[in-house]
Structure formats: C-alpha cells, structure tokens
Image (cartoon, rainbow, N blue to C red):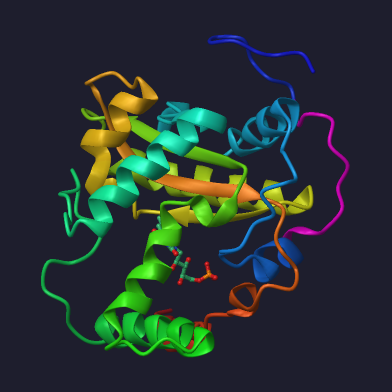
Amino acid sequence: MDRHREGEPTTGCPRTRRKVNVSEAIIGRQSIRAFDPTRPVTDDLILALLDIAARAPSGSNIQPWHVYVVRGDRQKKITAVCSERFLGGDEGDAEYHYYPKNWRQPYIGRRRETGFGLYGLLGIEKSDTKAVQDYRVTNYQFFGAPVALFFTIDRDMELGSWLDYGMFLQSLMLAARDNGLETCPQAAFCPYYDSVMPLLEAPEEQMLVCAMSVGYPVAAALINTFRTSRLSADSFTQFVD
Ligand SMILES: Cc1cc2nc3c(=O)[nH]c(=O)nc-3n(C[C@H](O)[C@H](O)[C@H](O)COP(=O)(O)O)c2cc1C
C-alpha cells in the first residue's frame, strides 16, 4: 500500500474489502477479553486499519492522535511492569481523570451493572479479592492479544481534541471488525503511564490516552459472550422543537 506523509492528502480508503455494513459493525462490536495469542496481525493490516481510522473527523482536521504499536518483547515488558505494580497494590496515578471523582447515580448504577454482570458471568464473587485480582491482571496481559496499541496526545491539546480522539478510536474498532479482528479499549494502563510511556519511547510532551488490545477472538471463551446493556434512545433524548 502507498503510504502517505504529513501534508500529502489521501484520496480515499485503503484497499480493504467491505464485509459488514456500518450498523452491523457498530451493533456487533463489544469489548473482547480473550484473544488468540497464536494468530498474529500483520504490519500491513495494522496500518490499513489505522489509515481507515484516520479518516475520522477532527476539528480543523488537526488529527491529534499518535499511535504506538507494541508486540513481542516490548509488549511482554509492559505486561511484566504493569502486572507487578498492580499485584503489588500500587494503584498508580493517571495523568487525567477518566471517571468522575465523586460517583453518583445514575452512573454508579450503570458501572455496577457492568461490573457485576461480568463477574457474575465468570462466577467471581466481588468479595473474593484474589479472584478479582486474578481477573483484573489479565488487562495487563492484553487478554492474550498479539498486538497492543497505545494512544497518546500532545499534552497542550484541549478538550476538543479528546472528542476527536474518541471518534478515531471508535473508527479503528469498527475497521478492525470489518477485517475479522476484535478489540478492547483499555484505560487500565493509564495509572501506570510513568512506566508505560518510557517503554514506548514516547516524548515528554505526550500523554497517554489509553491502550487497545487487538486480535482475533477466542470464539469459545465465556468472557467473550458478555454483552452490555444500553439505554434506549428515547430515555436520553428530548425533542425540543
Ligand atoms: C476508553 C475506554 C477505556 C476502557 N478501559 C477498559 C479497561 O481498562 N479494561 C476493560 O476490561 N475494559 C475497558 N473498557 C471497556 C468498557 O468496559 C466497555 O466498553 C463497556 O463496558 C461497554 O461494553 P462493550 O464495549 O462490550 O459494548 C474501556 C472502554 C473505553 C471506551
């Protein structure tokens, strides 16, 4: 595939065959937490997916994303460092707050529903701290995914660029599905950014937005059957005309 560089316009989509329609890709997407570690994802495919995602809109087309593709020894190193910190009880300290400082309804209820749903499916009692920890540490093993993506943003970018980033990430997850791949976006690495960013060789002026595990799902894995609920549109929409 021809690669385009800064300042060179791209004329359209890379050459990938469309296999699912957009609505199917959106509705069928779910966070996957068991990947087949033996099925690699090629560089060309990763770049093709990122080329598609990069067609996401951004204010004034400033395209505020930086992506680090991590595999092999570097991925193992990140797993080792973050797992050790997590298992050692080090909660870390993310550079930005993903969640509200004070949880309240309705958000805490939705969060609990998701957590209880997942743990319930896996037969994990919330009070079983060992089982909870054993599950949670699989985040740092990228759920077995052969590829980890890390996303950073220049720290002088404003909130608008974070909006842009979300569109880029969703576009990437949908493009992945179109190619038989699945994903799990992960904020779990953010508290350990001070370990992760040097391992990415990311410059000081960037901050970690999140990570994403990417790969082929293990179809038979129970955890991959977990399907979260959604509110219906009429519950959060007002027609004010
Ligand atoms: C930015 C972002 C960060 C997330 N971080 C994590 C994470 O660290 N670990 C995890 O298991 N899931 C993570 N998730 C997945 C959410 O839990 C999931 O999207 C939500 O429960 C809805 O489920 P679904 O993705 O299956 O539709 C993250 C999702 C987003 C969008």
Which span of residues is magenta-colored?
Answer: 12-22
The answer to whether residue 71 of the structure is visible from this angle is no
Residue 149: in sight, yes or no? Answer: yes
Residue at 21% x, 35% y is: 194
Q: Is residue 151 magenta?
A: no
Overall secondary structure of the magenta section: loop
Apparent side of residue 118 relative to residue 23 in the rendered image (left or right): left
| Residue found 43% across the figure and 31% down from its top | 65
In the rendered image, the quadrant that contains the C terminus is: bottom left
Residue 226: % across, % down:
58, 79
Residue 146 placement, left or right of 17: left
Q: Nearer the viewer, residue 172 or 196?
A: 196
Residue 133, by quadrant, is bottom left
| Residue 98, percent from left and from top | 26, 57
Residue shown at 17% from the left, 56% from the top: 91
Q: Is residue 232 above or below residue 196?
A: below
At horizontal 69% and vertical 54% (from top left) the residue drawn is 36
Q: Is residue 165 left or right of residue 7?
A: left
Furthest-left residue in this view:
102
171 lies above or below 28 = above
Image quarter (top left, top right, bottom left or bottom right) of the N terminus? top right
Residue 238: x and y in percent read: 41, 82
Residue 208: x and y, percent? Answer: 31, 38
Residue 12 sits in which quadrant?
top right
- The one of 83 and 206 positioned closer to us in this rendering: 83
Picture quadrant of ligand 1: bottom left
Q: Is residue 21 above or below residue 41?
A: below
